[in-house]
Structures are given as C-alpha cells and as structure tokens.
C-alpha cells in the first residue's frame, strides 16, 4: 500500500477512535458533573474535528501531481496541522475559563468512581493511538499524523492529571478547588502543544530549513562520498507532505562525458533513496570542475591535474548549502 494511503487509512481509524472516546467522556461528565472531566471532553471535540480535517488533508495530499500542482498536493498537510494546532490552543484557553468559573461558582461532584474508571480507560487508549500516529508519521514524513499523535498524547497527559484530581477529590472531598486546579494545570500543557504544532506547520508552509534532516543528510553523504564527487553545493530540501524534494549541484571532473556524469548523479540518487525511500525526489545539476578545484579534489591518478591536492573539504550544513563551488577557503 502506498505511503499516502497508509497515512489516510490510519487517520480514519484514529478519527473513529476519537469519536468513541468523546462519547465515553461525555458519559463520565454526565455521571459526575466534574468540570475537569467536562473540559477533557471539550478537548476531545477538538480531537474529532482535527481528525476529520486530518482525513481530508491526507486525502488531498494523496492525490497525484497534476498540471496545476506539479509538486503534488502535500502542502495541504501543513494547513491541516495549522488548523489543528489552533483548535488545540483555543480548547486550552476555554478550559482555563471554565476552571476559573468553577472556582467562583463551585458545585457538588458525584459518582467519582465511575467517572474515574471511564476517564482512565480513555487515557490508555489515547496514549496508544498517539504513539502509533507519531511512529507512523515520522516514518512516512506526515505532519498531520505527527500532529494528531502529539494531540492525542497531550490529551493523555491532561486526562492523567484529571484522574489524579479525581482520586484526590475522592480522598479529600472537602477541598472543592482541586477540580479546577487540575484543569488549569493541564490546560497549560495543552496550549503549549498547540503552539508547537502551529510552529511546525508554519515552518513547513514557509519552507523553513529542516536542520535535523539536513544534518542527517550531510553526515550520510560524507560517509559515502565518491572520489568523482569533488564538491556538493546549493543543496536545498523542501517537504511537501510525505515527499521530500532535494535540489543540489554536484561538481565532477570536467572531462567526464554526459553519460559518465549522469552515472555519478545516479549513484548519488541511489544513495539518498536507499536511506529515505522512494518518497524522495532529486533534481541534481552536474558542474564541471575548475582549476582551483584540484587542490581539494580527492581523485587519484588524474591525468589533467594542474595543482597538487592540499586539503579535503568536509561537507557541512553551511558549505553544502552555499551556491558556489568549494575552494580551500571553504569552511
């Protein structure tokens, strides 16, 4: 099954699970009257809405390239994550409001034992579902799945806090403010999670450099460098959903014919795809070396060398991104 279809199928399952858990939390709130459980249920409505948005965005991003979208539809995933992050943040703020309101106008809590069992059960399911989402999202480079996983796990921690609060209320029923205090505490975690999701989605929309991905790529290229790869520069990585687009310039000996230069590009492409799979699209431009390249060229027995080899230039995140051939002054 294609990666995009895997992502879409998992998102559908997660959405269905979110709906079931939302119903369970509403039942728990109805039984207890706890504002903490109500706010937890309120956040679950965001899970359901975000899940539906995620399904749609993954459906759109799974569409093949067309005339109007030559790079595909993967940017829809970033928009989905931005909406989800916003919803999470708003839910956190509403939770704070409801908790403060409950402090000012407290009401009795009932049947806490039943509510405790139901809420604890939803926490376990949320955590497992979130872990599956994050693992699959990282494997398939899917921001909506990662966002959904982070949201589910943040919901788990807030629910766990509510469970602790319910236990304290069972032990100390006279302390009326425990319910609201727990809700406020974990709403802060929810708001921070929403901020992180919004931040990562904006970075994707603006094509911000993914330093972790670039660092890993540079380390891999250095480790498998061929002697005809004199330098690699103007390297750029852009994410479109599950697809990674990589552009770069590869400097090779000037006397290689077109077929020989293309073989070097094929070797570079095979190396990258062996590491990252078929989700990578490479656009590699080959440059011929110039006289100043001799001093950094690793090629043995070069018949046209004009200068002695002096220094090997290690590729770094800095020099591999610049739009110029490497020299002895390159750092």
Image (cartoon, grey):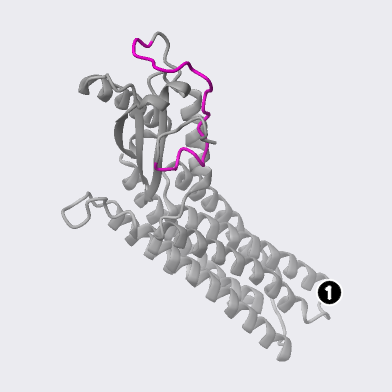
Residue that appears at 44% across and 42% down: 321
Q: Is residue 321 magenta?
A: yes
> Along the line of sight, which residue is nearer the eye, 85 or 282?
282
Q: Label 1: which residue? A: 172
Residue 230 x %, y % = 41, 25
> Along the line of sight, which residue is nearer the eye, 179 or 71?
71
Residue 165 x %, y % = 74, 69
Local SS, label 1 = loop
Q: Residue furthest left?
A: 67
Residue that appears at 49% across and 39% down: 319
Q: How many marks?
A: 1
Residue 281 horizontal side relative to residue 29, left or right = left
Residue that appears at 60% across and 69% down: 191
| Magenta span | 302-323
Q: Say which quarter of the image contains residue 293.
A: top left
> Along the line of sight, which residue is nearer the eye, 73 or 283?
283
Which quadrant: the N terminus?
Answer: top left
Q: Is residue 280 magenta?
A: no
Residue 42 drawn above or below residue 8: below
Q: Residues within 10 Å of mark 1 (few under 14, many from 20)?
A: few
Residue 73 horizontal side relative to residue 39, left or right = left
Residue 324 drawn above or below residue 145: above
What is the chief secondary structure element of the magenta stretch?
loop
Q: Inspect this view and state whether residue 85 appears.
A: yes
Residue that appears at 47% across and 31% down: 327
Which quadrant: the C terminus?
Answer: top right
């Amino acid at each position: 099954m294609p990666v995009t279809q895997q992502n879409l199928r998992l998102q559908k399952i997660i959405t269905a699970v979110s709906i079931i858990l939302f119903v369970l939390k509403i039942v728990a709130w109805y039984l207890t009257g706890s504002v903490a459980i109500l706010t937890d249920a309120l956040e679950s409505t965001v899970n359901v809405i975000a899940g539906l948005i995620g399904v749609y965005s993954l459906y759109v991003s799974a569409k093949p390239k067309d005339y109007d979208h030559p790079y595909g539809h993967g940017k829809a995933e970033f928009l989905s994550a931005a909406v989800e992050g916003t919803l999470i943040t708003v839910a956190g703020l509403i939770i704070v409001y409801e908790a403060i309101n409950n402090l000012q106008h407290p009401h009795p809590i009932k049947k806490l034992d039943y509510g405790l069992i139901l809420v604890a059960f939803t926490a376990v399911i949320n955590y497992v579902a979130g872990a599956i989402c994050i693992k699959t999202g990282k494997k398939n480079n899917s921001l909506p799945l990662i966002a959904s996983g982070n949201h589910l796990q943040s919901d788990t921690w807030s629910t766990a806090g509510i469970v602790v609060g319910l236990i304290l209320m069972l032990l100390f029923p006279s302390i009326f403010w425990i319910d609201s205090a727990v809700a406020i505490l974990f709403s802060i975690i929810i708001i921070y999670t929403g901020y992180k999701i919004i931040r990562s989605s904006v970075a994707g929309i603006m094509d911000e450099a993914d330093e972790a991905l670039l660092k890993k790529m540079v380390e891999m290229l250095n480790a498998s460098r061929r002697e005809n790869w004199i330098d690699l520069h103007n390297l750029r990585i852009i994410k479109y959903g599950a697809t990674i687009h990589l552009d770069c310039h590869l400097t090779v000996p000037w006397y290689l014919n077109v077929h020989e230069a293309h073989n070097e590009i094929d070797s570079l492409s095979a190396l990258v795809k062996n590491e990252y799979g078929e989700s990578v699209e490479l656009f590699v431009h080959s440059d011929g070396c110039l006289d100043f390249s001799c001093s950094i060229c690793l090629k043995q027995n070069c018949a046209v060398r004009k200068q002695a080899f002096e220094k090997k230039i290690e590729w770094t995140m800095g020099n591999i991104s610049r739009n110029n051939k490497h020299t002895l002054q390159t750092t």
